[in-house]
Amino acid sequence: MKIFTKTKNLIEYISTIKDKKIGFVPTMGALHNGHISLIKRSTDENDITIVSIFVNPTQFLEGEDFKKYPKKIEADKKICSYAGIDILFLPTAKDIYSDDEPHLLAPSIKGYIIEGYRRPGHFNGVLQVVLKLLNITKANNAYFGKKDAQQLYLVKKMVESLYIRTNIVECDIVREENGLALSSRNIYLTDIEKQKALCISKSLKKASALVINGERNVDSLKNIILHELKEVRIEYIEIVNRNFEKIEKIEINNSIILIAVYVGATRLIDNIWI
Ligand code: PAF
């Protein structure tokens, strides 16, 4: 596994790679089984896999957890090496960003609803760094988890709108056996909070079971989820179609139920695609 910390050196190296399919997994580190499943998919489907670890400052809002975002670089290096990746990219913010540079703005509607409404500007930072990383890596395939459903939607939209030649691969959410969706931020949870957080996936499972049994009404489903979410502070429960448009009735194979809650001081998001 080659490790690059300078963008210039990585670009030079990638320019020497010919006739090989490149897979790319962008991350912010503190790797868990969710990331490992993205990496595995990339190593299975490509000749070369690049993983980036970069806690991107521009996607954190004032007062968010940028400074305390979990860092486990030595463990992450081992995980990447065992997973058989070819290139690990560990840039610094100074290397990625210059003082005065063009900015990419998330779409003014879909970038500012749901997650984007609670974290205005967050998706500008995400798209800005993902665009840079896709340009640097020249990936044929880039792997994103469905857990960050709106991020995934907006990245796909950006790739389509800017004619970027990377295929965005949607990857399933990975959960603990008890249903808790894996997230680097789960590290912040105490054991008691972890127990409390289980109501999130349970509520989504219940909603999905009701849909299977014929329930289609979005308001009824939201109400049921609301009652399941105990001992957490609800930020939102939203049901949209896969174009991130509000719907009144569930459209099978075209709907997503999204939840954001606080468990203690930790903000968690989760969703289910139905
Ligand atoms: O999902 C993430 O970890 C980040 O938003 C990403 C895609 C690596 C961009 O910083």
Image (cartoon, rainbow, N blue to C red):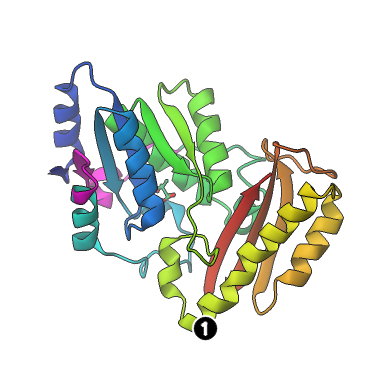
Q: Which residues are magenta?
A: 82-103
User: Within the image, what quadrant is residue 183 found in?
Assistant: bottom left
Amino acid type indicated by mark 1:
Ile
Q: Residue at x 78, y 49 (%)?
A: 211
Count numbered badges in the picture.
1
Q: Nearer the viewer, residue 107 or 231?
A: 231
User: Can residue 106 be seen in the rendering of this structure?
Assistant: no
Queried whether the magenta region covers residue 31, the answer comes back as: no
Classified by dominant secondary structure, the portion drawn in magenta counts as loop
4 or 30, which lies in front?
Answer: 30
Q: Residue at x 62, y 53 (%)?
A: 271
Location of the C terminus (image quadrant): top right
List the residue tagged with mark 1. 192
Residue 210, position in %: x, y? 79, 54
Q: Is residue 154 left or right of residue 40?
A: right
Q: Position of residue 123 (x, y in %)?
A: 52, 46
Check the image and name the residue furthest to the top: 19
Image position, residue 185 (x, y; %): 44, 66
Q: Position of residue 34 (x, y in %)?
A: 41, 53
